């Protein structure tokens, strides 16, 4: 029986689950579904550990399971991984550019807080930065829903 999206949204991701979600997203750039073994290899864990975390992500509505094939991101999962990547890349860009923090430290700090930044704060940093399309690592910054309707610039 499907669970309502509002109920799913109330189930916050753990930091570890967010790392798995990003791993699935990255693996999906090469194929349409990913298996537990693929994820286990990327995350450096056993296949059983990866399977258990993927199951929790499925239960939270982040993944779609294809029996005997693997998983892909659900619409909710894709929105969530884009939100996490946007938070990370905007924060990292802001801290590196305006606070003059070296890129490695900015990236590490962004990784630690990417789940906890509000859209309002990230949108504000994005506006100050001029709506960049790339982070300092030259990776795309996902567009903000309420922020990036204005013309975007390079960092």
Image (tube, helix red, strand yellow):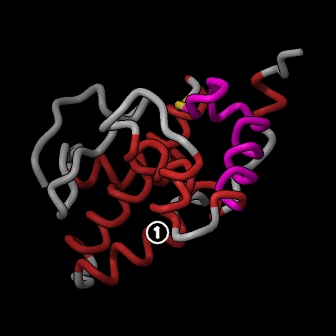
As displayed, is residue 116 above or below residue 83?
A: below
Q: Nearer the viewer, residue 14 or 94?
A: 14
Q: Residue at x 56, y 54 (%)?
A: 20
Residue 142 location (% of width, % of height): 33, 39
Residue 80 location (% of width, % of height): 55, 39
Local SS, label 1: helix
Q: Is residue 19 rendered magenta in the image?
A: no
Q: Quadrant of residue 61?
A: top right
Judged left or right of residue 13, residue 98 is left
As displayed, is residue 35 above or below residue 17?
A: above
Q: Residue at x 12, y 42 (%)?
A: 153
Q: Quadrant of the N terminus?
A: top right
From this viewpoint, which residue is outermost toward the right? 1
Mark 1, other Cα within 10 Å: few <14 / some 14–19 / many ≥20: some
As displayed, is residue 140 above or below residue 98?
A: above
Judged left or right of residue 96, residue 41 is right
Judged left or right of residue 142, residue 119 is right
Mark 1 = which residue? 111
* Segment colored magenta: 49-71
């Amino acid at each position: 029986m499907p669970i309502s999206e509002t109920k799913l949204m109330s189930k916050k991701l753990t930091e570890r689950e967010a790392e798995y979600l990003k791993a699935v997203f990255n693996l999906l750039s090469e194929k349409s579904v990913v298996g537990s073994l693929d994820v286990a290899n990327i995350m450096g864990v056993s296949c059983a550990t990866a399977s258990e975390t993927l199951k929790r992500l499925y239960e939270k509505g982040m993944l779609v399971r294809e029996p005997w094939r693997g998983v892909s991101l659900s619409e909710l999962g894709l929105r969530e991984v884009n939100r996490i990547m946007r938070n990370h890349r905007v924060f990292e860009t802001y801290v590196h550019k305006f606070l003059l923090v070296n890129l490695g430290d900015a990236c590490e700090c962004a990784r630690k807080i990417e789940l906890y930044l509000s859209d309002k704060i990230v949108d504000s940093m994005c506006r100050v930065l001029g709506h960049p399309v790339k982070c300092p690592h030259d990776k795309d910054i996902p567009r903000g829903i309420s922020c990036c309707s204005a013309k975007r610039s390079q960092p």
